[in-house]
Every structure is written in structure tokens, then in C-alpha cells.
Amino acid sequence: MTGPSDYIAGVSSDARKAPRRVVFVTRRTSAHVRSVDEEQVQTWPEALFRAALIVEMLVIALVLISLFFNAPLEGIANPTVTPNPAKAPWYFLGLQEMLHYFPPVVAGVMIPTLLVVALVVIPYFNINIRPDGVFLKHRRRNLTVFYVVAVSLSLFLWFFDVYVALVPTLVAAAFMLIAAYSGPQSPGRFRRYLVSRPVSWWIMTWFLLELVVLTMVGTFFRGPGWSWVLPWRS
Amino acid sequence: MQLQKQASRLDKLMASRLWKSIFRSGRGASTLHRSMAIQQNVFLHILPTKVRRRMLNFDATWYLGTLTLGTFLLLVITGILLMFYYHPSVPQAYADMKDLRYVVSSGLFLRNLHRWSAHAMVLLAFAHMFRVFYRGAYRPPREFNWVVGVILLLVTLLLSYTGYLLPWDQLAFWAITVGSNISSAVPVVGHKIHFLLLGGNLVNANALLRFYVLHTVILPLAAVLFIAVHFWRIRKDGGLYVQQSEPARETAEEARADENTQQVVVKQ
């Protein structure tokens, strides 16, 4: 903005409602709406009634489950008889699966610590806030990083025989490859959707995939000595 | 007729001096009264007085946070009832499980409800986290509420895990043995942490008592505290995140700048 010809000025006229506002719009840009006023309703009773209703439905569902399914209760705790396999609660079975491949300091301490730290810092890095598709900006750099990370991670998991974690990694990598070699004009809505996904979405989705697969495997497919079993053959 | 009578009795009660001395907001259906019902209530004032209508749609949030809170409330109620029948000692704890099953009226149902609600809470907390992530609701200015959410997820997991030992059956004993052994793997201070956690070198009566105190006092208090902060921050951070109604912010600095300047607001 060097001279007066570079911008137009406007003054808000509704002085009764709001303080006088002066707006300058440079000629090179155009004014655009940054936020829109939305219809609002009172928390009481609109939101609280809905919340109460949904909680009541949850309670009904849980009561029904509790009427038909009994909580497990085995024999009294006996330190001299170790069940095989001894399993942690289901939400820790992903970590217990990792414990099968890596020493406890890695699977039990480093991985969970890294996970918690990674979750906490998500909103503090701009890379996780930008909404751009991962391969749309800085394509060559990002593609190189992707290949290096995907290949080294896969080789690492393969080297330690962690096939359970390798498969979800390869699946995620395959979808990332589809995204990398498609564009915003590609045919197919799904491909265009993948193209628009930012890097944080890919990492979280890979994590979700690993979490689901590892937990399912630990819950249903692990038997004596942590060997592979089929749940429908027991 | 009966209903009318009851309604008038309720009106009379709400107009009474006693009622008015307790509830500061007074009665009435005006917007002011409805705002005051939230604002003038010590428990509700952490909520905003108004919410965007769009956020009440089921597909906006799937009500996952509300449902997680619902399971927590259910767990507090069933948990307190269970505490009446439970002794955190060996071997009485296991005998209490048998009593709940065969002696206490509805004891089996009570324990079932507590157990399944606990699993539901863990599942819902995870679902809530992923849902918030995929909607992008963790973005500034809501960063800290995301952190509080992660803390609450950890508290939820710890609550579930400490509760897992209390029945004192084989399932409980060995799950906690497997889990607590991991803490020994922490470099340098591992064995000290393990000892502190269990009150001994093995899962025994001391461990049961420690887990009981953690499960019924310390962790629920922590949960209540962080849940309060979590809800309060929703209001402080501008209500639930709605896509499109807010500017697409690329950086934290941009979001902060937006907060501090008057925005040109366009009526739809």
C-alpha cells in the first residue's frame, strides 16, 4: 500500500449497534467473509435436555447389556498358578503385543511415553493445523520424506518380525501412494478425498489402524505362549 | 386435572421464599431466566449460556463427550453402591464378589453395570478423542483443552486399570502382574516405582489396598477436577468447534490475532 489509489476505504454506518468501523480493502485482494454469525439457542433447556436424553439412552443400553451378560469372575487369585496366556485388560493388549517383540523398556516405557507426548503436542505444531493435502505443497520434499519414513519403518518392523504392525503400515502407505499420484482433478471422489488429507490426518489414521489391529489381535488371536490362535477354533 | 393440580403445587413451591433462597435464577421462561439458570448455578455456570444450534445435531459431535460423562456418572453411582459390599482385603475381596453374585439383592446386576460401563467409558473416551481429531477441533485456541482431554484419557485408563484388580480373581491378579511388571522396566527408578505402586515386590494385599484407594478416592477426584476444567474450557475457548463458521486458521498466531480483533460479522 503505497498510494491512496491502492485501496478503497469504507465506513460502517450502523453506529447504533456497533462502534464505528473503518475498513480498508486493498485493490489486489477482495473482501471475504471470515466468520458468519450462527443461530444460537439457550443451553437450558435445549442442550441440557438433549444431553439428558442421550445419557438416558446410554443407561438403558448398558442396563440391558448388564441384564444379559455377566461380568467375568474366575477363581480366587493364586500367585502359584499362572494362566497361559496372562492377558492385560483389552485396551493394553496393543502394548502387550509389542512386548512380545521388543524388550520391556521399549514396548512398556518408550512406546507409551512417545504416544502420550505425541498426542499432547499435536495442537502445538503448525504442521498439524494446516489443512493442505500433504502432497499438494512442497511435493518433492514431502514425497522424499514419505518414502524414507515408510520404507525405513516397514524394514524396521519386518526386521523384528512385527508383521502384525507391518500390515497396517503397508496399508496406510499404499493409500498414501494413491494420494501422492492423484491430483485434485483425479476421477473418483475417494481419490480426491485422499489427495486433500494433511499429514496429521495420515499419521493419526495410521495410529488408529495400528491400535485397532493390535488390540483385536491381542484380544482374539493370541493363545498359550502368545501363539497365533483362531478365536472360532477354541 | 390431577396434572394441573400438581403443576400449580410446583408453581407454588417455586414461588416460595425457601425455593428463591436456594435457586438464585428465579423462575420464568424468558431468555434472561434461562440464561440465569445456567449462569447463576454453581454446577452449570461452567457451561456457556448459549450454544450454536448446529452443534446440537447428532452428527456434529455424536454426543461422544456427553456419553463419556454419562458413563462416568453411572460409574460413580454404581461404584459407591458397590463400596457398601466390598472390603479391600485378602481374601475377603473375592468372597465379596461371590456375595455380590449369590447373596446381595441385585448384586450381580450392580457389578455387571459397573463393569460394562467401565469398558464403555474407555471405548467412548477413545472414540471422543479420534472424533475431535478428525473434526479438527483440537486446533487453536482449543489446544489446551485437547491436552486436558489427553490427561482425562489417561485418568480413565488408570481408573479402569486400578479397578481391574479389585475382584481379586485370577483374571485381576495376573493382568495387574503383567501390567505392573512393565513399570520395573523404567530405567534407573523402575524397581522403586514398582515397589511404590504395589506396596511390595509382588501383587499382594498391600497392592489391593493401594489400588482401592487410587480407584475410589484419588483418581475419581482427579477425574472430576479435570472434567470441570474440560467443560469450562469449552466455554472459554468459544464454544464447541464448528466447521465453516470460523475462519480457516493456518497457524496459532493467526487464531490468537483473530481473537483479539473485532471481526466483521455478516448476518446470514
Image (cartoon, coloured by chain):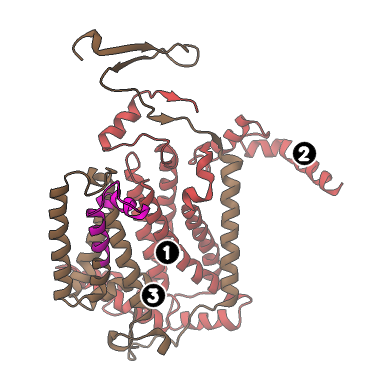
Chain colours: A brown, B red
Question: Within the magenta stretch, is there residue A196?
Answer: yes
Callout 2: few (<14), some (14-19), or many (20+) C-alpha neighbours within 10 Å? few
Q: Quadrant of residue A34?
A: top left
N-terminal label among 3 and 2: 2
Mark 2, chain letter? B
- Between label 3 and label 1, give the one nearer the viewer: 1
Q: Is residue B201 visible?
A: yes
Residue designated by label 1: B122
Callout 1: few (<14), some (14-19), or many (20+) C-alpha neighbours within 10 Å? many
N-terminal label among 3 and 1: 1
Vertical comparison of B121 with A50: above or below: below
- Between label 3 and label 2, give the one nearer the viewer: 2
Q: Is residue B86 left or right of residue A211?
A: right
Magenta segment boundaries in residue numbering: A171-200
Picture quarter with the N terminus of chain A = top left
Callout 3: few (<14), some (14-19), or many (20+) C-alpha neighbours within 10 Å? many
Q: Going 40% across and 61% down the picture, which residue do you hit?
A: B156
Q: Position of residue A216 (x, y in %)?
A: 36, 74
**Secondary-structure class at tag 1:** helix
Q: Main secondary structure of the magenta part?
A: helix
Q: Which mark is residue B12?
A: 2
Mark 1, chain letter? B
Residue designated by label 3: B208
Vertical comparison of A22 with B20: above or below: above
Residue at the extreme front: A187
